[in-house]
Structures are given as structure tokens and as C-alpha cells.
Amino acid sequence: MKFLLLLLSLLLSASVNAQEPSQAAIATAHPLATQAGKRILQSGGNAFDAAVAITATLAVVEPYSSGLGGGGFWLLRDQKQHKTIMLDGREMAPGKAHRDMYLDQDGNYIAKSSVDGPLAAGIPGTVAAMVHLSEKYGNLPLQQVLQSAIKYAEKGFPVTSHYQKMAAFRLSVLQRYKSSADIFLHNNEVPESGHLIVQKDLAQTLKLIAQKGNAGFYQGNIANKLVDSVKANAGIWHLNDLKNYTIKEREPVQFHYRHMKITSAAPPSSGGIALATMLQILQNYELKSLDDVTQTHLIIEAMRRAYRDRAEFLGDSDFTNVPTERLTHAWYADGLQKGIRLDKAMPSSDLPEIGANLKTKIVNSQTEGQDTTHFSVLDTQGNLVSATMSINYPFGSGFTAAGTGVLLNDEMDDFSARPGTPNVYGLVGAEANAIAPGKRPLSSMSPTLVETDKGIAILGTPGGSRIITMVLLGILELEKGAAAQQWVTRPRFHHQYLPDKVFYEKNAFSMEQAAELELMGHHTSQLDSGYGNMQVINWDYVNGVQAASDPRVEGQAVVFDVP
């Protein structure tokens, strides 16, 4: 009886801790966004209010990573309603989009046509997501929540070395459009460190959103300016495209890995399904009993198979039949695992082929890593948000709609412009991700929650096609019992089926380990620089809250008391 009473006491204690953490936490990719969210929580807002403030602030101070002209996924845990949902604010293809819009008369992809300029832009969802979050889940008025973003747009924010790096990478396309060059460059060149980026038009757009909600962006003056500017520069947007944009609440992907319950993004994200495949393959092995090279080999083989399935099966589930239940089932992963040898890599060419032309024109994308953005939030009521947003390539399409300050995305490149032709991240796809009007392009953004009997972890990162494997490696660190800081600092490696290469950071493998992997049949390629920008929170029911920001860039993580 005493044992039962003690057990009941521990369970009740864990339940209380699980409902109300003693402190709040925020981790974002930019200190100004972290501080904006902190102010909201300390002013009586909840995690969802803070998420809106952070989303809007990042849209101002990280124009190379996200913005009002982009989209994303917001994974929410509403403690009061006891529900977890995925808010799908992914961009949609315009009504005049069609399957072959980026191909020439011979059926060949027209270089950069889905990357540069307004033709590359899908209809943005970020604003609709912010308004939905505020109206349905927040405590504070939208006008109050958007004040930090409006201030930084009006008064400016200082250029950092990371801003300079991103601007230099996309300098030519920013110079092509005066509306962008006037805002994001200085004298038509990369701005000097400390130069203030002032966005007066964007401030006015944010004020209209604060006053009118969706109508301030998707209808009226701003909508007219967006469409007129896009059309004047060979784009295909129509006013109805904006008016008809819809935010969607979706059931996230959920599965179990050993003692963990993992919740991640559902289609049109590939993240949750790919994580389920990889982790459920790996749970067939006692990784900790194996040497480092064998562990790495098995993780690579799991990555290879998950990304192969991504290429064949995944797309917008509103348009294509994505076999989510089958792909996330442990039995399916067991079947994939049967083809893995402990001593030898399987060439990607030996896996079942996907369509014609798949093995042609595969590129090695080494530009990705910090474009896109992620943040994690936990409030003292136990509400939490894991959110990943993007405008795709750094500075998106490079095109800013005149009079709005809105820099447009180039997310149309995330569709399969032609089955088998890789996008800017080297990812290939099949008919499931072909372009269609109103369709949402497949994404790798993977906001994720990991629950155990000890607590809840909030993870996510930017990084193009490498997002999913970074989250995977973070979860494996969590499984080892590592502190949050180790999840974000862990050296990384990545395989995405095609190209058949293992890309890795400098410290991920020793020369001897890389050589051993090569002997097993892996093709390794060390990257010139690190990649990713992971932002995490770990809420331990007993030991309290930790937060960590990836040191590779310039984010900020804080744990703090709320009055």
C-alpha cells in the first residue's frame, strides 16, 4: 500500500510539473526576436502571443530567412485544451500556375526560373498564420503583439556579419530589383556592419495587419500593390489568389521511438514521416553497444531510405494520396531495415528507382544551412510552440513588391519542376509533388516535440534538405541524456538519397572514421563550413527548464521568470 501511495504521489507530482513549468523559455535565431517574445510573456501574453511577436519580428530582422512574403509551420501544444495541432501556413501555388511552368518548349528546366523573381513566388501564408494564432489562441490584442516588429521596421536594425554573408550570396538578384536594393543594400552593395536596415513600407503593412487582421494584407490596398507589382514583373498572381488563401489546422505526425513519443510536422512537410522512418529503423539496433563508425553507417542508411521515400511518395496531402499510415508504421520501417548490412553501404542506385530522369543532373548543394528560421517557446502555463518559417533561398525570390516592403518567397522551387530534376537543395521529387494551382509545395521544415516520462523537448532548425537529419541527430543526443546545449552544438552529417554522398561538418568525423566509411562504400564530402541554426528548449519536470541557441549563427536562448 505504501508503495502504491508513493507511486501515486510521484505521478501526481509529475502531472503538476507537466502542467506548469516554473519558468518560461524562448530560443530564436535573432536576439531582437527573443527579446520581443520575452516582453510579450512578461506583459501577460501566452506562448501563442509570443509566437506571433517572434514571427513578425523575425520577418523584419531576418529578411534573408523569413518574412511576411513567406510561410511556415507552427506546431502548438495548447495545455488548457489538451491538444496538439499543426498550423499549416505554407505557401500556395497561384491559380495560374501549371505543371510545366518552368520548362522550355523541349521540356527542359529553365535555369533559375523557379528561384529568382516574382514568378518563383507562392501565395504567402505567414500573415494568415499570425492572425489565426492571435485570434484563436492568444490573450493579447494583435496591435500590442506586433509593436516590436513595427518598431524595428520603422527605426531599423543593425547589419551583422551574418546579414552581410547572406546578402553577398544573393547580391546579384537583390541588385536586379530596385525595390529590394533600396531596402536591403547600401549604395547597391552589401551594407557595412552596423548599417541600419530601415523598412518604412513594411512598417505600414504591419500596422494595417495590426488594425485589420487578414483584410489588411490579403485584401485592400496592400493586396492591390502586391498583385500590381508582381504582374508588372512577369509574375502571375491575381487578387483572388490572396483573397482565397486559407490557413489549415492539421493533425501532426505522431509515433513512438523507444520510450519517446514524437510529434512532428505532417504533409505538406516531409519532416514527420521521414523522422518516423529513420528512428523506427534505428530502434532495431542497440546503437550504444556499437562503435562510432557502425552507428554512423546505420544512421546514414536510415537517412538514405527515408529520403528515397520522400522523393516518391510525399506531397500536399490535399492533392495527392500520401500513404502516411503505412510510411510511419514500425512494421514498414522493419521491412526497410532488412535490407541494411552492418558492414556495407547500399548504393542509392540499388534502391527501387523512382521515375525517369531521376539519376540525371543531380547537384551538390552546399549553400544551404542558415536560410529559413526556427524558434521555440514555452510559457509558465505549459503552452508551447515549435515553429519553422521560410522564404526558401536566402532573401527568397529577391523581389520586393513596390510600396509594401514585402520580400517575396521563392517556394515554388520546392515543387518538382520536372520529375527527377533537383531543386536548389539537390532534392528530387516525383508526380506527388508536381505543380498545380492552389497546391502547397513539399517542405523539409520539421518543428518537433519529444515527450518522455521525464519531460518535453522542443526542437527545430533551418537548413533546407538537411533540416530533418539535424532534428534526427538532436533527438539522438536527447536519447543519450545530453544537455540542450549539446543538441545544438553536435557536429552534423547528412545523406538525402541523391546525390549519393554523405555531407559532413569538419568535426563530425575524424580522418580515420571518414576513411572507414569510404571502405564500407559511402561517398563522403566534408563541407567548408558548418550548417544549421537549431533553437531548442528542454522542459525537465524535475530539474526545470533549459534552452539553447545554435552557436553557428547569432541567435539567443533565454530562461526567465514571469511575474
Image (cartoon, rainbow, N blue to C red):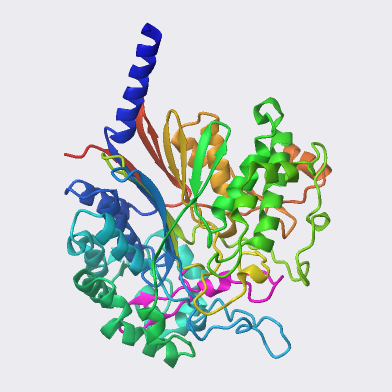
**In this view of the protein, which residue sits in the foreground, 36 or 221?**
221
* Residue 467 shows up from this direction: no
Residue depicted at 66% across the width and 84% down the height: 103
**Relative to residue 436, is residue 72 drawn left or right?**
left
Q: Is residue 128 left or right of residue 151?
A: right
Residue 56 screen position, x and y as percent: 31, 63
- 92 vs 111, left or right, is left
Q: Nearer the viewer, residue 40 or 141?
A: 141
Q: Residue 129 vs residue 476: left or right? A: left
Q: Position of residue 369 (x, y in %)?
A: 54, 57
Q: Tell me what residue is drawn at x 27 percent, y 85 percent.
A: 221
Highlighted magenta segment, given as a residue range: 394-423
Q: Is residue 290 above or below residue 130?
A: above
Residue at the far top in the pictured view: 2
Q: Please report the residue visible at 63 percent of the width from the left and 76 percent of the height from the top.
A: 417
Q: Position of residue 309 (x, y in %)?
A: 68, 57
Closer to us: 530 or 164:
530
Q: Is residue 205 located in the magenta-colored stretch of the structure?
A: no
Q: Picture coordinates of residue 306 (x, y %)? A: 67, 52
Query: What secondary structure do most residues of the magenta stretch adopt?
Result: loop
468 in relation to 196, above or below: above
